[in-house]
Image (cartoon, rainbow, N blue to C red):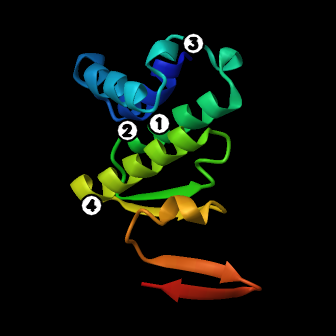
């Protein structure tokens, strides 16, 4: 499947016609920096591009909860910031709960969300 087809897959499975979801998938791919790679096959994508496509596929159907394990691990700092902003917007506008696991704590300092830190085997909750 192309990048577009991969991201659109959850909507296809839900039975939505392509004419309805094409603009949303295209806009989301542009937002995560894959607009130019919409027709690329996975074998032609870098690791970071594959990760961004996976994130886009995970959010396109607007789930109530998103579990994101190191979503910024293979991307540059600018794109990491954009992705975290995307998660914040999904939370703000759609009420989507985002549970994000990361080692990049400074990236989260821009946001005022509760945090749970695992330190020496103990879970510490910060509001």
Query: Which disc number belongs to residue 40?
Result: 3
Q: Write the residue at 47% across / 27% down.
A: 33
Contact, mark 3 vs mark 2 (Cβ under 8 Å): no
Q: Between marks 4 and 1, how big is the CA–CA gap? A: 18 Å
Secondary element at image label 4:
loop
Contact, mark 2 vs mark 1 (Cβ under 8 Å): yes
Q: Earlier in the sequence, mark 3 or mark 1?
A: 3
> Which quadrant holds residue 46?
top right
Q: Earlier in the sequence, mark 3 or mark 2?
A: 3
Contact, mark 3 vs mark 4 (Cβ under 8 Å): no
Q: Residue furthest right?
A: 120
Q: Is residue 66 above or below residue 1?
A: below
Q: Position of residue 125 (x, y in %)?
A: 52, 86
Q: Which residue in the structure is indicated by mark 2?
A: 60
Answer with left or right where residue 20 lies relative to residue 97: left
Q: Is residue 97 above or below residue 2?
A: below
Q: Between marks 3 and 1, how big is the CA–CA gap? A: 15 Å
Secondary element at image label 2:
loop
Q: Which residue in the structure is indicated by mark 4?
A: 95
Q: Write the residue at 37% across / 71% down.
A: 112
Q: Residue furthest top?
A: 39
How many other residues sit within 10 Å of disc 3, few (<14), some (14-19) or many (≥20)?
some
Contact, mark 2 vs mark 4 (Cβ under 8 Å): no
Mark yes or no: residue 88 visible: yes
Query: Which disc number belongs to residue 9?
Result: none
Q: Nearer the viewer, residue 106 or 71?
A: 106
Q: Position of residue 15 (x, y in %)?
A: 31, 29
């Amino acid at each position: 499947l192309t990048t577009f087809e991969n991201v659109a897959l959850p909507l296809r499975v839900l039975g939505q016609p392509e004419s309805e979801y094409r603009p949303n998938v295209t806009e989301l791919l542009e937002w995560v920096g894959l607009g130019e790679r919409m027709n690329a096959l996975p074998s032609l994508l870098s690791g970071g591009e594959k990760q961004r496509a996976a994130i886009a596929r995970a959010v396109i159907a607007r789930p109530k909860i998103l579990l994101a394990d190191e979503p910024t691990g293979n991307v540059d700092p600018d794109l990491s910031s954009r992705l975290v902003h995307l998660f914040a917007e999904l939370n703000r506008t759609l009420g989507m709960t985002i549970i994000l696991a990361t080692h990049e704590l400074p990236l989260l300092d821009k946001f005022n969300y509760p945090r749970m830190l695992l330190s020496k085997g103990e879970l510490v909750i910060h509001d």
